[in-house]
Image: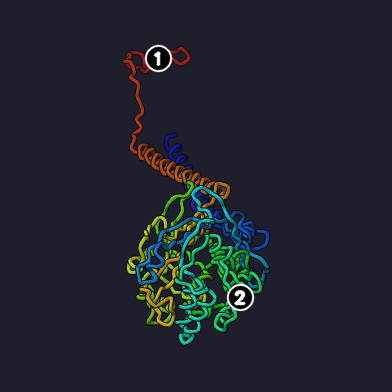
């Protein structure tokens, strides 16, 4: 029976081990993977499509303005001194409109639209506060004309005196609301040739608000608020889950035309609202940024936790186009590349605006030394994305970018004659998202189920191994045991004679022997 028991234990353990390997280690993971692949696409009727087309919650949008504290000193060649004012808080509602589908090629086509609304919260600064910044119109026009038509600078000098009524500095003092969204009025009711020529160009640009027949208004974000952007075509991912959201065309073209090389004009990645599931950390997170006319890749940093969920943290930078040969195509010219951490957007937006991380974090020290009052901080100023790998969704993200302008002396424009060369920051923004428990709960339930199955399968596997060990031990023990039959002692009796008592008769022939 002991031998039979060991065999029974061995057979049961082997069957259990085979079952748990098949179900727990092979079938269940494949089932989860297959389920995620089937759910994460932008086809009709999919929940993720609805969230992709209209994000059901607002993103946090914070703006910080660098208030200039010594404008007249800068006019005379002094080093700029700034203080950060903010955040000015807004809600950013993202949606995609004019949506069409190309079923044959598995493509969704749409126009993006971002709408900003004011948000009052603890720690937010009122938009009524007054700040001083370099006038983006004055500084931008002079820098742009200096690059493309330097011969027209004398005309621009006369136009400024007319439109801005003989200004004594290039600095603008106004409320944050006016600078950001409401608009700062530009007096275009002038009659001189230079002023009228400048205002005519400003009207035709389409980026300014028309106040009345005479006046225009300039703001940093007003033109973008609630405005449909250029058309994007992206793959839906119903045929290949790894292609979900990948942009294949922007503004009617598969390549941009802003940069001198094909590599820099390539459009890669998604629009940042959706990513393919089950990405390897080595692949990074690639997204296309129309405002920068380029794609950016976020690199894996570490594993961490968010609301109890294991996630991967990623970060991104603008590189160093002064040293990296693959990034030199983003320079204005091959001989005028900016140093580490900065990118010139002139070929993208038509104005020499420099983009970097806030407070010149992770940038060349020379930019930080050119301005007083900046305090770069990794936690506050880096780009950070917490990415849930299985479902392919960012659970928390902080996209932070600073916008600055070059400040250069120019002898043809009176207001620019005495400047010391530097890069002066104007503002920086943080676009953020932190999923609440409503949206993390399904992910946590999936991970709880996976964790329970993982624990169970390992316990069963260990129990199966223990059963095999036990059956082997019993089998070995049984083979080493010798079976001995016990013998009973027989009591001594009288010698046996040839007498037979059968039937009670005596054998007479044996008589006397």
For the residues marked 1 and 2, what is the alpha-carbon distance in whole angstroms?
166 Å
| Residue at 53% across, 46% down | 449
Within-10-Å neighbours for mark 1: few <14, some 14–19, many 20+? few
For residue 12, which numbered disc appears in the image?
A: none
Depth order, front residue of 223/416: 416
| Residue at 62% across, 67% down | 227
Q: Please name the residue that numbered disc 2 is placed on.
A: 189
Eye-nearest disc, 1 or 2 = 2
Mark before the other along the chain sequence, 1 or 2: 2
Answer left or right for 476 relative to 135: left
Q: In the displayed structure, would residue 493 be above or below residue 73?
A: above
Q: How is the image coloured?
A: rainbow
Q: Residue furthest bottom?
A: 151
Q: Secondary structure at mark 2?
A: loop
x%, y% of residue 121? 53, 49
Q: In the displayed structure, would residue 479 be above or below residue 363?
A: above
x%, y% of residue 255? 54, 78
x%, y% of residue 370? 34, 68
Q: Does the image show residue 216? A: yes
Q: Secondary structure at mark 1?
A: helix
Q: In which quadrant of the rendered image does the C terminus lie?
A: top left
Q: How many marks?
A: 2
Q: Does the image show residue 266? A: no
Q: Quadrant of residue 81?
A: bottom left
| Residue at 63% across, 59% down | 54
Q: In the displayed structure, would residue 306 be above or below residue 272?
A: above
Q: In which quadrant of the rendered image does the N terminus lie?
A: top left
Contact, CB < 8 Å: mark 1 with mark 2?
no
| Residue at 61% across, 66% down | 112
Q: Please name the residue that numbered disc 1 is placed on.
A: 508
């Amino acid at each position: 029976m002991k031998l039979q028991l060991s065999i029974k234990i061995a057979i049961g353990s082997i069957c259990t081990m085979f079952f748990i390997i098949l179900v727990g280690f092979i079938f269940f993971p494949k089932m989860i993977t297959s389920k995620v692949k089937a759910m994460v696409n932008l086809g009709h009727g999919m929940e993720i499509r609805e969230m992709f087309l209209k994000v059901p919650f607002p993103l946090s949008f914070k703006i910080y303005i660098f208030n200039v504290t010594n404008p007249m000193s800068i006019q005379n060649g002094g080093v700029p001194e700034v203080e950060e004012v903010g955040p000015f808080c807004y809600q950013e509602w993202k949606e995609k409109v004019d949506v069409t589908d190309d079923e044959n090629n598995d493509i969704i086509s749409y126009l993006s639209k971002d709408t900003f609304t004011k948000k009052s919260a603890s720690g937010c600064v009122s938009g009524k506060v007054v700040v001083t910044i370099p006038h983006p119109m004055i500084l931008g026009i002079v820098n742009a004309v200096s690059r493309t038509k330097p011969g027209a600078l004398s005309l621009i000098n006369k136009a400024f005196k007319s439109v801005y009524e003989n200004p004594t500095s290039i600095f603008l003092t106004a409320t944050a609301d006016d600078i950001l969204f409401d608009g700062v009025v530009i007096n275009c009711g002038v009659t001189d040739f230079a002023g009228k020529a400048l205002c005519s160009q400003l009207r035709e640009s389409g980026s300014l608000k028309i106040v009345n027949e005479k006046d225009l208004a300039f703001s940093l974000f007003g033109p973008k608020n609630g405005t449909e952007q250029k058309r994007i075509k992206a793959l839906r991912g119903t045929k290949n889950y790894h292609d979900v959201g990948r942009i294949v065309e922007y503004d009617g073209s598969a390549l941009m035309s802003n940069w001198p090389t094909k590599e820099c004009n390539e459009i890669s990645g998604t629009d940042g609202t959706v990513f393919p599931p089950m990405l390897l950390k080595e692949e990074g997170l690639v997204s296309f940024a129309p405002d920068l006319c380029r794609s950016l890749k976020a690199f894996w940093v570490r594993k961490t936790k968010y609301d109890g969920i294991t996630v991967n943290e990623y970060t991104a930078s603008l590189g160093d186009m002064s040293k990296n040969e693959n990034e030199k195509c983003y320079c204005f010219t091959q001989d005028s590349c900016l140093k580490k951490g900065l990118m010139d957007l002139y070929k993208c937006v038509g104005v020499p605006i420099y983009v970097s991380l806030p407070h010149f974090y992770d940038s060349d020290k020379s930019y930080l030394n050119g301005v007083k009052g900046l305090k770069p901080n990794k936690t506050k100023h880096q780009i950070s994305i917490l990415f849930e790998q299985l479902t392919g969704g960012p659970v928390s993200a902080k996209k932070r970018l600073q916008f600055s302008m070059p400040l250069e002396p120019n002898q043809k424009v009176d207001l620019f004659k005495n400047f010391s060369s530097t890069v002066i920051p104007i503002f920086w923004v943080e676009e953020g998202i932190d999923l609440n428990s409503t949206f993390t709960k399904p992910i946590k339930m999936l991970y709880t189920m996976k964790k329970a199955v993982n624990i169970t399968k390992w316990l069963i596997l260990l129990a199966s191994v223990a059963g095999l060990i036990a059956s082997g031990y019993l089998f070995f023990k049984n083979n080493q045991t010798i079976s001995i039959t016990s013998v009973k002692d027989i009591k001594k009796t009288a010698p046996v004679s040839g007498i037979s008592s059968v039937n009670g008769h005596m054998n007479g022939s044996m008589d006397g022997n």
